[in-house]
Image (tube, rainbow, N blue to C red):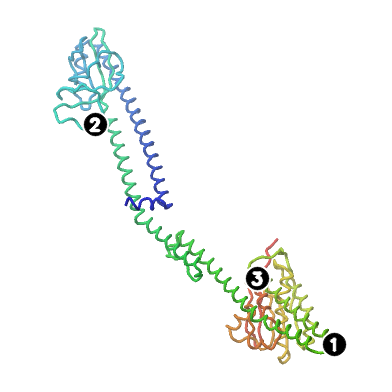
Amino acid sequence: MALRLPAIMRTTAARLSALYFILFALCAILLVHYMTSLSASILTAQTMETINEEVQGLDRAYRRGGLPFLVRVVGQRSRQPGANLYLIADVNGRILTGNVESLEPGVLETEGWTEQPFTYQRYGEGIVERRAPNVSDLEAPSATTETRHAAIALVSRLPNQMIVLVGRDLGEPERFRVVVQRALIFALSIMAVGGLLIWYFIGRRALKRIDSISDAGKRIMGGDLSGRLPVTGAGDEFDRLSENLNTMLTRIAGLNEGLRQVSDNIAHDLKTPLTRLRNRAEAALAGNPEAEGYREALEATIAESDRLIKTFNAILMISRLEAGYSAEQLVKVDLAAATRDVVELYEPAAEELGVKLEASVDGSFMVDGNRELIGQALSNVVDNAIKYSAGADEPTVRVSVERTDGGISLKVADNGPGIPDQTDRDRATERFVRLEQSRSQPGSGLGLSLAKAVMKFHGGRLELLPGEPGLTVAMTFPEAKSG
C-alpha cells in the first residue's frame, strides 16, 4: 500500500478528497474548540452567579440568627442532592461543618474568588492528594480510595473572623468538554472511514472509467477513427463527455470520408476533361499548321478550361458551406422574387429545348439568407429539371413556392424519367455522383451537391421526391424571424 500511495495521490480525485478532509477537520476542530470554550465560559459564569446568590443567602441567615443559625442552614443545604460546596472553618482553617472533608492547602488563606480551580475531598471520600487537577484525574479516579474533584469557590470571612466557603464542582464543564472531544474524534474517524469506502467503491470506478476513456483515446489517436468512447448509460458527466466526443468523432470521420471521396472523385472525374485538353492540344500540334485549326483547338481548350474552373469553384463553395463558413451576411430575402428572376433567366434555354417552364409564385415569402447562394442553388435545380425533362412527351417544369408547416417550400417538378429508387435519390446529392441515366447529359455531378450545401447553410433541407412521372426537388427554408 505504501508503494501505491504516491500513484493514488497523483489523481485529482484523491487530492481533492484529502484537501476536503483536511479542511473539514480544521474547521471541525476550530468549531469544537470555540464551542467548548464558549460553553465552559457560560457554565462557569452561571456557576459564579449561583455562588454569589448562595453567599448572599448565607449572609442574610447569619444576620438573622447568628452563627448557630448559619451552621444549621449550611448543614441543611450541604445534605441536599447536587448541593454546592459548603464549608465553615475557624480562623486557623480547621473545618467545623459542611460537606467538604479536606481542601488543597492555601485555598482558605485569601478572601474572594479562588484564582485557579482547586482540588477537594467531599466528606467521607478519604484523603485528598496535594496536586493540581487534570482532566484524566476527573475521568478516572485512582485505584485507591481517594477521589479527587476540582472546583471554584468564593471565600469570605464573618465578623468574628470565621471562614465561609461556598463553591461549585467543575466536573460538569469538564465532562462536557470530554464528551465533545470524544464526539469530534468519533466524527473524524467516521469521516475518514467513509471517505475510504467512497473512494474504494466510487472513486475506483471513476478512475476505471477514466482509464477506459484514455485507452479509447489512444486507439483513436493511433488512427482508428471508428473507435468510440464508452458510454455506460448512467447519464453522468462521464457519459455526457463521451457522447459529445463521440459526436465529434463521428463528424471528423464523416469529414475524412468526404475528403477521401472528393479526392477520389476529383482524380476520377477530372481525368476525362484533362485528357481531352491534352488530346486537343496534341491533335492541333500534329495537324496542319493552319491558323483556323489552332483557333478552334484554343477555343475548345478555353471552353474545357472554363468548365474545369467552374467545377473547382463549385467544389470550393461546397466545402466552405459544409464547414459553415461564409463571408456574406444573412439578410431578408424575398424567395418569391428570387424564384421569378431565375425562372425568367432560364425561359430562353427552356424554349430552345422545347420545355415548358411554368412558375406558380404569388405573394411574398421572406427568408433569412444569401440571395446569391439561393439563386445559384435554384439555378442548378432548374437547369437539371430542364435537361432531364427535354426528352419527355410535352416536357414541363413547374416551379412553385408555398408556405408549409415546416417553413417555406420551394419546389421544382419535372415530368422527365425521374429517379424511382430511394437509394439512388439519396446518392444523387453526393458530390460527383452521376446516375446511369445521367451519363448522357453534360455536367459534373455537383449541381445537387451544391444545392444541398446551400440548404444546410441556411438551416433548411433538400429533398428529392418521386413524381408521377418525373422528379420533384423540394427546398424547404425556415421562415424569416420577425423584426
Q: Amino acid at mark 3?
A: Ser
Tell me the number on the disc at residue 63: none
Where's residue 56, x and y in %?
Answer: 30, 16
Q: Earlier in the sequence, mark 3 or mark 2?
A: 2
* Number of the label disc, if any, that sits on residue 290: 1
Mark 2 sits on what residue? 136
Q: Is residue 445 left or right of residue 204?
A: right
Residue most extreme to the top: 160
Q: Residue furthest bottom?
A: 393
Q: Are marks 3 and 2 in contact (CB under 8 Å)?
A: no
Evaluate if marks 2 and 1 touch, with contact meaning CB atoms under 8 Å apart. no
- Label pair 1/3, CB-CB below 8 angstroms: no
3D distance between C-alphas at marks 2 and 1: 124 Å
- From what the image shows, is residue 424 above or below residue 477? below
Q: What kind of element bears circle 3?
A: helix
Q: Residue at x 27, y 27 (%)?
A: 170
Determine the secondary structure under disc 1. Answer: loop
Where is residue 164, by image quadrant? top left
Q: Amino acid at mark 1?
A: Glu
Query: How far apart, in angstroms, are the residues tagged by discs 1 and 3?
Result: 43 Å
Q: Which residue is mark 3?
A: 319
Crowding at mark 3 (Cα within 10 Å: few <14, some 14-19, many 20+): some
Cα separation between marks 3 and 2: 83 Å
Relative placement, left or right, of 249 versus 269 is: left
**Amino acid on which disc 2 is placed:** Ser
Q: Quadrant of residue 86?
A: top left
Estimate the x, y position of residue 185 in percent, counting from the top left.
31, 40
Q: Earlier in the sequence, mark 1 or mark 3?
A: 1
Q: How many marks?
A: 3
Q: Decide: is 79 above or below 430.
A: above
Q: Residues within 10 Å of mark 1 (few under 14, many from 20)?
A: few
